[in-house]
Amino acid sequence: MRDPAFKAEQLAGVHLPSVTTVNQLVESLREPEPSAGRGWVPYVAPLHVGSEARILSILRGPGSMTRETKGSGMLCVENDDDSAALQCQLLASVDLTPADLTPRITHLTPRITQQPHTPRKWT
């Protein structure tokens, strides 16, 4: 989020009725950065209207721009990363807005680049 006023507005709204349930869960799971245990858990930005959204977007893991130390501290299509930009493009291509979508993550650990898979030889 490049606009500091927008970011402040979103952070101030993490307990609005539509996102408070999910963000209270986030707070119960959160660890201070840098996390030494389960991993970073970002808020869901109020822009997405949480439980009132029509679409649930399941993401692999929190990207670096969801971290408070580097980015917004939230899952949001307004983050400054490729995933957020792609989601904005996809929403626009079908005449939807960020309020139609609520992002979630499948697990708490950040994505790690893995070595190519070596097929196992069965004998």
Image (cartoon, rainbow, N blue to C red):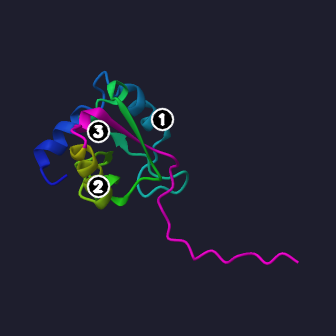
CA gap between label 1 and label 2 equals 30 Å
Residue 86: mark:
2
Q: Which residue is drawn at 24% across and 49% down?
A: 88
> Which residue corresponds to mark 3?
45
Is label 3 or label 2 in front? 2
Query: Residue 12 versus residue 107: which sits nearer the camera?
Result: 107
Query: Residue 62 versus residue 120: which sits nearer the camera?
Result: 120
Where does the magenta region start and end?
94-123
Is label 3 or label 1 in front? 3
**As drawn, 89 above or below 15:** below
CA gap between label 3 and label 2 equals 17 Å
In which image quadrant can residue 58 be found? Answer: top left
SS class of the residue under badge 1? Answer: helix
Measured from the top left, where is residue 17 in percent x and y? Answer: 31, 21
In which image quadrant can residue 100 be found? Answer: top left
Q: Residue at x 24, y 51 (%)?
A: 89
Helix, strand or loop for the magenta stretch, by majority = loop
Q: Does the magenta portion include 107?
A: yes
Q: What residue type is labelled 3?
A: Ala
Measured from the top left, where is residue 74 in percent x and y? Answer: 32, 45
Q: Residue at x 47, y 55 (%)?
A: 35
> Which residue corresponds to mark 1?
28
Measured from the top left, where is residue 96 in percent x and y? Answer: 24, 37
Q: What residue type is labelled 2?
A: Leu
Q: Which residue is situated farthest in the top direction here?
A: 17
Instruction: Report the number of discs.
Output: 3
Query: Residue 77 versus residue 16: which sits nearer the camera?
Result: 77
Query: Mark 1 or 2 closer to N-term?
Result: 1
SS class of the residue under badge 3? Answer: loop
SS class of the residue under badge 2? Answer: helix
